[in-house]
Image: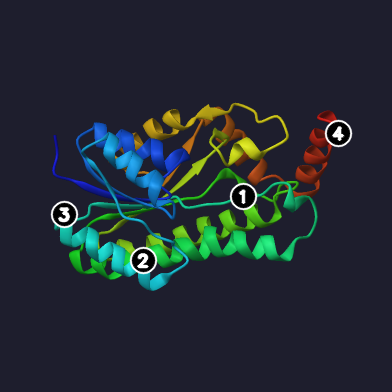
């Protein structure tokens, strides 16, 4: 058992939900936030270590209010992990300005709102941990993923900048870069997803990286993410050629 506390946004489903259970089962107190209050309540009722704090991360003031409630309840927060995210692969097959703006607002600015809520707390405390869930989709542009890839690329870059800013105050910053994880969001994809893993697998990898490692980036599954890292450093002409060939092979 432990008296440590983690706040998880995007905690009503997918990776966030699996991670909440993982931390709770390890004895942590877990505050979960998301818009769908009924799902949060269902999860919190199933585990005494999980506590519901409904939140729409697009509301910056509400993010601050919710975090204050969490601090008031537990008197301390050790990790703040932000995993709120949306994706709509069908709409990204064409240029859909409204949908791209929605993806950027939720994935990037929603996360910034959440970081803003905890920034001064950890800075003044001179300890703690801010973790941002990005994706290997942020490494390079991918077909039918313009808005999603851009939002995740922005998050990864921001996490790198935040790492330097918060290191001066002894606050750890990490970025999480999953490959394909089976969640309600990836269930929308209509293409083969190589080396796909479960949300529970992701939660185990993240728990290990968050509590037993000092690395900046937590990425998994390793075989897939290392392949993506190779693609990341390829010259543009070669990368574009390989992706085009891959799309042809799967009939897209």
Q: Residues within 10 Å of mark 3 (few under 14, many from 20)?
A: some
Measured in 3D between alpha carbons, the distance from the residue under mark 1 to the one under mark 4, in whole angstroms, is 23 Å
Q: Nearer the viewer, residue 57 or 241?
A: 57
The residue depicted at 32 percent of the width and 33 percent of the height is 22
Q: Quadrant of residue 42?
A: top left
Q: Quadrant of the N terminus?
A: top left
The residue depicted at 52 percent of the width and 52 percent of the height is 85
Q: Which mark is residue 238?
A: none
Q: Secondary structure at mark 2?
A: helix
Residue that numbered label 1 is attached to: 87
Q: Secondary structure at mark 4?
A: helix
Measured in 3D between alpha carbons, the distance from the residue under mark 2 to the one under mark 1, in whole angstroms, is 22 Å
Task: Using residue 64 as the reference point, say whether residue 133 is left or right of it.
Answer: right
State whether residue 103 is above or below residue 201: below
Mark nearest the camera among 2 and 4 is 2
Measured in 3D between alpha carbons, the distance from the residue under mark 1 to the one under mark 3, in whole angstroms, is 33 Å
- N-terminal of the pair, mark 1 or mark 4, is 1
Q: Which mark is residue 74?
A: 3
- N-terminal of the pair, mark 2 or mark 1, is 2
Measured in 3D between alpha carbons, the distance from the residue under mark 2 to the one under mark 4, in whole angstroms, is 44 Å
Q: Nearer the viewer, residue 113 or 88?
A: 88
Task: Using residue 129 as the reference point, say whether residue 75 is left or right of it.
Answer: left
Residue that numbered label 2 is attached to: 63
Residue that numbered label 4 is attached to: 248
Image spot of residue 78 (x, y percent) = 23, 52
The residue depicted at 73 percent of the width and 52 percent of the height is 91
């Amino acid at each position: 058992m432990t008296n440590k506390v983690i706040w998880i946004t995007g905690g009503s489903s997918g990776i966030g939900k699996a991670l909440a259970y993982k931390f709770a089962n390890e004895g942590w107190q877990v505050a979960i936030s998301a818009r769908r209050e009924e799902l949060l309540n269902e999860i919190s009722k199933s585990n005494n270590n999980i506590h519901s704090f409904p939140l729409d991360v697009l509301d910056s003031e509400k993010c601050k209010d919710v975090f204050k409630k969490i601090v008031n309840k537990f008197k301390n927060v050790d990790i703040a992990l932000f995993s709120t995210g949306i994706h709509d692969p069908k709409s990204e097959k064409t240029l859909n300005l409204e949908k791209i703006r929605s993806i950027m607002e939720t994935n990037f600015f929603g996360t910034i709102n959440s970081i803003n809520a905890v920034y001064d707390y950890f800075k003044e405390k001179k300890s703690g941990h801010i973790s941002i869930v990005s994706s290997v989709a942020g490494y390079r542009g991918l077909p039918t993923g313009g808005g999603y890839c851009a939002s995740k690329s922005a998050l990864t870059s921001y996490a790198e900048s935040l790492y330097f800013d918060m290191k001066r105050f002894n606050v750890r910053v990490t970025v999480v870069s999953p490959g394909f994880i089976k969640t309600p969001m990836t269930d929308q994809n209509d293409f083969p997803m190589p080396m796909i893993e479960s949300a529970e697998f992701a939660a185990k990898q993240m728990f290990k990286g968050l509590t037993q490692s000092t690395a900046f980036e937590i990425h998994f599954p390793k075989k897939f993410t290392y392949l993506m890292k190779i693609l990341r450093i390829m010259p543009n002409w070669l990368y574009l050629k390989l992706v085009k060939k891959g799309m042809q092979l799967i009939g897209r």
